[in-house]
Image: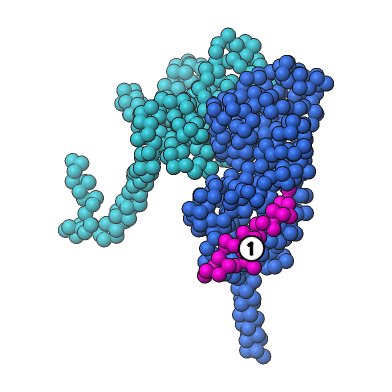
């Protein structure tokens, strides 16, 4: 009796171990940009329940993501800063866009509510350049005749840590202002002409909220969650628009993905009447030559699921999913480019 | 006298059977373990130096004196970070050393034992708070307080000095220095208290016996007796303040600029590293950050060496019995 029980228990144990081993068979590791992390982690969580494929994503920053995928320590990398086609080729990488977000200027001016302040391209550049020092400057008053603007010094709050948000924001400023391009330029960290530096989106938000007359920039999801006072911006068409999922989508729709080699696309300053001027895509990087067919297939299946069924989660978290045409193009590139043992992985 | 002892230390086998094997084994074990420390320091130094070489080659000594920090054009200078590190530490020391001496005197000389025990425990608790908590508290609670009350008051009364000019933003060099002072206060206080308790009761009692008041005993006996220890405690705090990272990052303002005003934002070596290291990709950028680390390493090392020399001198000159 005792022996049978023992045997049964052992059998159960062995079966259990095998079962576990099977369930744990597929593990996909990724690392990179922190901006899309809320969506990626939700997607991975849901996908694990559906398909028993475990996707780990560590948000270590875009720079880290690029370095890790180049060193082949992860299966995919995430980055907000797109890589040029030559750089992708150099490391045998394929890059494709995954989500779209936007950078939003937020202000703290007495008596001004969200969406009331309008900033033209010239104003935005001049404020961050330090040329306009007070909120009652005639130039700001002229663009906002209905607002009562106080005599208050402008304090710029920028990111102190290296960040994709800074990259997008300064990239936009460089496009609209030759002066900015010549004196400051763009990058994940730049030499700001004026202002104070804060750590992370939350640091920028906290400082803008506290310093009267403060202006900073944060990711859209953060501006919505934190109930911050955002400003309207003038887009390329000369229209003032408010940040919203629709205005980001408009930026993505007007973007000419077909003529963007290697999907190198920066969505700042896109055409269209409803387009938000500082939108940006976040990208996934994978190796073109995959060592393991099964894993490669599982990974692409996961990305396909994200494109086709992940939109609700993304929208709920205030991120914008990719338009359908772009998804089709991306899948075509998978078929063409991603290979394992010389055979295409995706059909 | 010294040499034979050193030689004997490294003798693997006992020579005339005078020493049991266990003693030799223990000596070697402890010697090797202790050797880890200098080896580690040496290894860190060599690594820092190796990876700083591109920066040293590109900018030379100018790296130490240039205020430019521009990752876009790949021009780097450490002056603003070094300045910020030194100034924030100086503010912290100016506030923390006298304050902790007064607290220690209260604990030792004035307060009844039970109060002294309660306050002592509270101060020890203060030392156990992680620095990120100081940072968050500094940003969300202390900085608004500085902006609303302290900085306007200072600007009003001492605004004629360039030190206290500019808009009261709450964060900046002064706030960072004060937060640092809070952080090193418990260390300095605890050591100072221990030093003061070591003053021989006989000496104090004789002073009382000669008719001295509490103030006179404190001023003429306890403080001179403990001054060397107080200085030692101060240097310990100094070492900690120089390298403090998270709390400073939150409140210093993180701007690569040198300004005369303490209200203005600045940055320190440690805060700059914390902010920019993770996303630095260009080789020269990484190298410049590591060179900053090397500068901090050398500054901290020099401070420790100087403090040791100074302490030994004073110890000999005053020949107090502590």
Q: Magenta segment range?
A: A320-347
| Label 1, residues with CA under 10 Å away: few <14, some 14-19, many ≥20 | some
Tell me the residue that label 1 is attached to: A300
Q: Name, please, the residue furthest toward the top.
A: B160
Q: Chain of mark 1?
A: A
> Which quarter of the figure has residue B249?
top right
Magenta highlight on residue A196: no
Residue found at x 70% / y 36%: A277
Colour displayed for chain B in the image of the structure: cyan
User: How was this image coloured?
Assistant: by chain
Residue found at x 50% / y 34%: B71
Residue found at x 65% / y 15%: B153
**Position in image of residue B312 (x %, y %):** 33, 29
Does the rendering let one see residue B123? no
Front residue of this view, candidates A83 and B18: A83
Front residue of this view, candidates B57 and B262: B57
- For residue A343, above or below residue B117: below
Question: Dot 1 lies on which element?
Answer: helix
Does the rendering let one see residue A255? yes
* Chain that the image shows in blue: A
Front residue of this view, candidates B213 and A110: A110
Residue found at x 72% / y 18%: A139
**Position in image of residue B98 (x %, y %):** 51, 22
């Amino acid at each position: 009796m005792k022996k049978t029980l023992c045997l049964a228990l052992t059998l159960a144990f062995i079966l259990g171990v095998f079962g576990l081993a099977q369930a744990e068979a597929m593990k996909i590791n990724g690392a990179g940009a922190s901006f899309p992390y809320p969506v990626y982690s939700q997607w991975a969580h849901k996908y694990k329940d559906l398909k028993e494929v475990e996707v780990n994503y560590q948000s270590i920053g875009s720079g880290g993501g690029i370095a890790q995928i180049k060193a082949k320590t992860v299966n995919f990398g995430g980055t907000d800063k797109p890589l040029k086609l030559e750089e992708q080729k150099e490391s045998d990488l394929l890059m494709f866009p995954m989500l779209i977000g936007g950078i939003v200027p937020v202000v703290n001016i007495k008596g001004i509510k969200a969406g009331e302040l309008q900033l033209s391209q010239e104003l935005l550049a001049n404020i961050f350049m330090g040329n306009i020092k007070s909120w009652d400057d005639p130039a700001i008053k002229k663009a906002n005749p209905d607002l009562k603007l106080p005599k208050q010094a402008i304090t710029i709050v920028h990111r102190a840590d290296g960040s994709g948000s800074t990259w997008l924001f300064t990239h936009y400023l460089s496009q609209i202002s030759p002066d900015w391009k010549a004196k400051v330029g763009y990058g994940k960290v730049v030499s700001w002409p004026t202002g104070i530096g804060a750590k992370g989106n939350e640091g920028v938000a906290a400082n803008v909220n506290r310093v009267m007359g403060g202006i900073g920039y944060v990711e859209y999801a953060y501006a919505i969650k934190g109930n911050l006072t955002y400003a309207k911006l003038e887009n390329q068409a000369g229209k003032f628009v408010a940040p919203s999922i629709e205005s980001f989508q408009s930026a993505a729709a007007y973007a000419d993905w077909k003529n963007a080699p290697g999907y190198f696309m920066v969505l700042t300053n896109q055409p269209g009447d409803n387009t938000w001027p500082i939108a940006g895509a976040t990208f996934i990087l994978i190796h073109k030559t995959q060592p393991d067919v099964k894993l490669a297939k599982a990974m692409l299946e996961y990305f396909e699921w994200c494109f086709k069924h992940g939109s609700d989660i993304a929208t709920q978290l205030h991120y914008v999913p990719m338009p359908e045409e772009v998804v089709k193009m991306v899948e075509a590139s998978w078929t063409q480019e991603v290979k394992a043992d010389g055979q295409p992985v995706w059909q | 006298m010294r040499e034979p002892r050193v030689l004997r230390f490294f003798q693997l086998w006992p020579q005339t059977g005078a020493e049991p094997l266990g003693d030799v084994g223990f000596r070697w074990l402890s010697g090797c373990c202790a050797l880890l420390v200098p080896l580690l320091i040496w290894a860190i130094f060599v690594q820092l130096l190796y990876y700083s070489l591109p920066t040293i080659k590109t900018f030379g000594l100018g790296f130490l004196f240039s205020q430019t920090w521009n990752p876009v054009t790949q021009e780097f200078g450490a002056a603003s970070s070094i300045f910020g590190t030194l100034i924030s530490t100086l503010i912290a020391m100016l506030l923390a050393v006298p304050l902790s001496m007064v607290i220690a005197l209260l604990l030792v000389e004035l307060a009844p034992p039970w109060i002294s025990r309660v306050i002592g425990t509270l101060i020890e608790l203060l030392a156990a708070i992680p620095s990120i908590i100081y940072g968050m508290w500094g940003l969300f609670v202390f900085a608004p307080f500085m902006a609303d009350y302290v900085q306007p008051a200072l600007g009003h009364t001492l605004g004629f000095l360039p030190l206290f000019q500019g808009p009261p933003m709450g964060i900046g060099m002064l706030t960072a220095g004060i937060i640092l002072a809070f952080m090193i206060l418990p260390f300095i206080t605890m050591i100072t208290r221990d030093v003061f308790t070591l003053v021989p009761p006989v000496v104090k009692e004789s002073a009382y016996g000669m008719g001295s008041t509490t103030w006179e005993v404190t001023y003429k006996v306890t403080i001179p007796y403990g001054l060397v220890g107080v200085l030692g405690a101060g240097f310990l705090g100094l070492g900690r303040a120089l390298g403090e990272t998270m709390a400073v990052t939150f409140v210093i303002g993180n701007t690569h600029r040198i300004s005369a005003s303490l209200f203005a934002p600045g940055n320190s070596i440690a805060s700059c590293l914390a902010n920019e290291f993770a996303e630095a990709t260009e080789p020269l950028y990484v190298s410049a950050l590591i060179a900053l680390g090397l500068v901090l390493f050398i500054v901290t090392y020099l401070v420790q060496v100087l403090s040791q020399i100074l302490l030994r001198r004073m110890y000999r000159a005053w020949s107090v019995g502590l």
